[in-house]
Image (spheres, rainbow, N blue to C red):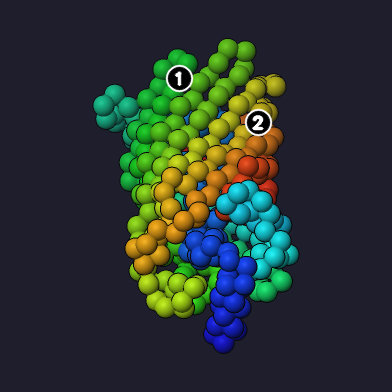
């Protein structure tokens, strides 16, 4: 505990010396923003279509690494708390899926959940901290899927629950300590010649964290992450039967500023765009996909690389 307090005091000093926005400290090292520990972006790829009725299990393994932190203008921060910045996040997400034989509004319906195990570590010249364990569980009580010969649509409503471990005195947390409501709309086009195109559109609405320490004053207050729009995309080509390659990535854009104690923190919005190669193999009841995504056009966030291994099994 003494170590945490000393690290927080150092951050306060750095904040005043280098005039780094409080929202940057709160969002990036605190419960939300920067790299949301349980937020799903870039996880899915080719043919992200609602499956036929049945029971499925998806296992996602991922690794994220970053050696840069960008400011509001997209410039790398090389001094203060982010001097010699390094961030590593590894995790595994188990996602059971159930699809009913019955239809609602002409669509198949289903439900699923994501159970994340996270290991997160952040360090710089002035601090070194990490945590691991159960992250924020994602619940999807209902999703609807419509299918045509070419186009496939999916509408879902996810809830990110505050199940991950959180301590207001820690610099790094694996839990956000607030609820998030996340509607999703997905469109997939299966095109002639073995091509496919998928776009997932998501919008995050965050609830308030009522157990937060303002890094400027060290006083307990509330913290509310701003609303965010993000999208995943995948463009694939079937190189041979049951095998695809293509380009995948994600885009994230904060729509509103974060709030500390009910007051908006200016210049606290972040953004990122990523792209990279992907490969998918459909083998019997198993679909395996591998991908790596390189981040660019970053503001108010770490800039790094995300890699995924996704395995889907059909029961």
User: Which residue extends farthest top?
Assistant: 192
Front in this rendered view, residue 40 or 80: 80
Q: Residue at x 53, y 74 (%)?
A: 170
Q: Which mark is residue 276?
A: none
Which residue is located at x 44 percent, y 74 percent?
213
Q: Is residue 188 left or right of residue 159?
A: right
Q: CA distance from mark 1 to mark 2?
A: 19 Å
Quadrant of the snapshot with the N terminus: bottom right
Is residue 308 something that shows in the picture? no
Per the rendering, the mark at residue 151 is: 1
* Secondary element type, mark 1: strand
Give x and y (percent) for residue 87: 66, 61
The one of 237 and 282 positioned closer to us in this rendering = 237
Mark 2 = which residue? 247
Where on the picture, by quarter, is residue 104?
A: top left
**Which residue is outermost to the left?**
105
Q: Quadrant of residue 136?
A: bottom left
The image shows residue 134, relative to residue 127, as above or below, that is above
- Camera-nearest residue between 178 and 273: 273
Q: Is residue 84 above or below residue 219?
A: above
Instruction: Give x and y (percent) for residue 179.
Output: 36, 57
- Assign a secondary structure to mark 2: strand
Q: Earlier in the sequence, mark 1 or mark 2?
A: 1
- Can residue 40 be seen from the camera position used here? yes
Q: Residue at x 60, y 26 (%)?
A: 235
Residue 66 placement (x, y as % from top left): 68, 55
Mark 2 surroundings within 10 Å by alpha-carbon count, few (fewer than 14), some (14 through 19), many (20 or more): many
Count of numbered labels shown in the rendering: 2
CB under 8 Å between callouts 1 and 2? no
């Amino acid at each position: 505990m003494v170590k945490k307090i000393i690290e927080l005091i150092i951050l306060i000093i750095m904040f005043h010396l280098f005039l780094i926005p409080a929202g940057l400290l709160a969002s990036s090292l605190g419960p939300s923003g920067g790299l949301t520990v349980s937020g799903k972006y870039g996880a899915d790829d080719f043919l992200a279509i609602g499956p036929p009725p049945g029971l499925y299990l998806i296992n996602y393994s991922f690794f994220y690494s970053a050696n840069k932190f960008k400011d509001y203008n997209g410039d790398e921060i090389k001094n203060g708390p982010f001097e010699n910045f390094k961030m590593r996040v590894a995790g595994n997400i188990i996602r059971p899926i159930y699809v009913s034989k019955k239809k609602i509004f002409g669509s198949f319906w289903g439900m699923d959940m994501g159970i994340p195990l996270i290991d997160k570590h952040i360090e710089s010249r002035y601090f070194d901290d990490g945590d691991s364990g159960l992250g924020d569980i994602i619940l999807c009580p209902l999703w609807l899927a419509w299918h045509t010969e070419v186009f496939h649509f999916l509408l879902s409503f996810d809830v990110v629950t505050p199940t991950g471990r959180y301590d207001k005195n820690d610099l790094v947390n694996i839990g956000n300590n607030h609820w998030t409501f996340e509607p999703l709309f997905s469109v997939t086009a299966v095109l002639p010649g073995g091509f496919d195109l998928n776009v997932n559109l998501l919008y995050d609405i965050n609830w308030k964290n009522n157990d937060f320490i303002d890094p400027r004053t060290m006083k307990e207050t509330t913290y509310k992450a701003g609303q965010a729009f993000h999208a995943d995309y995948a463009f694939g080509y079937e190189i041979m039967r049951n095998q695809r390659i293509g380009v995948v990535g994600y885009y994230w854009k904060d729509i509103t500023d974060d709030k500390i104690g009910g007051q908006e923190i200016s210049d606290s919005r972040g953004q990122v765009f990523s792209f990279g190669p992907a490969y998918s193999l459909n083998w019997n009841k198993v679909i395996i996909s591998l991908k790596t995504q390189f981040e660019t056009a970053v503001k108010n966030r770490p800039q790094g690389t995300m890699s995924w291994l996704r395995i889907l099994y059909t029961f």
